[in-house]
Image (tube, rainbow, N blue to C red):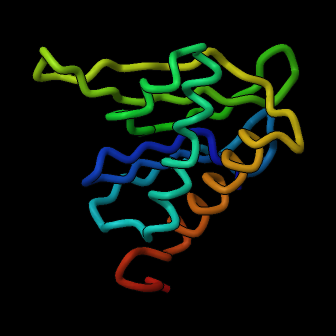
Amino acid sequence: MNVTKVRYDGTRVHIEWTTGDPDKPDVYSLGCRQAPKQEFIKSLATLTPSVINICELPKDYIVGMTVCGVSFSKSRGAMGATITALKTLNDSDVPLVLTTPHIPLAPGSETWAALDEVLRQSELYVNGERAQGAMF
């Protein structure tokens, strides 16, 4: 399983993945309202400091920020990710949407470890591990 996209808006999980030949992959997606395990939610939240660092934002911007998605892809032959976060604003009813540039995955980095956990939790969710227990 090659997870390509993960989203969680607080009520719905959406995961896309491919299998098979990378040149002619089979593409799958799952959209589900069944609550994920807390570990899934935490794996996304762990990326919040990475968004601050990658986007070169002041450290205090972390208050009111929630990571809601990750897209995994290749750019110039290197695997990487784009992280999407929402930031509440004082004078607006809608959040600011922040999307990082595509970042290459550097093994051993803090962001690498956090993204790896998002992938692991996503695969567990697809395989039926949800907040209420295993589905299969």
Residue at the image position 55 percent from the left and 72 percent from the top: 127
Residue at the image position 60 percent from the left and 13 percent from the top: 56
- Compared across the picture, whether 132 is left or right of 113 comes to left
x, y percent for residue 73: 70, 29
x, y percent for residue 9: 31, 44
* Relative height, residue 20 to residue 68 (above, below): below
* Relative height, residue 98 to residue 71 (above, below): above
23 and 114: which one is in front?
114
Q: Quadrant of residue 36?
A: bottom left
- Compared across the picture, whether 14 is left or right of 49 comes to left
x, y percent for residue 130: 42, 74
x, y percent for residue 61: 42, 24
101 and 32: which one is in front?
101
Q: Quadrant of residue 64?
A: top left
Residue at the image position 67 percent from the left and 56 percent from the top: 117
Q: Quadrant of residue 76?
A: top right
60 and 40: which one is in front?
60
Residue at the image position 43 percent from the left and 19 percent from the top: 98
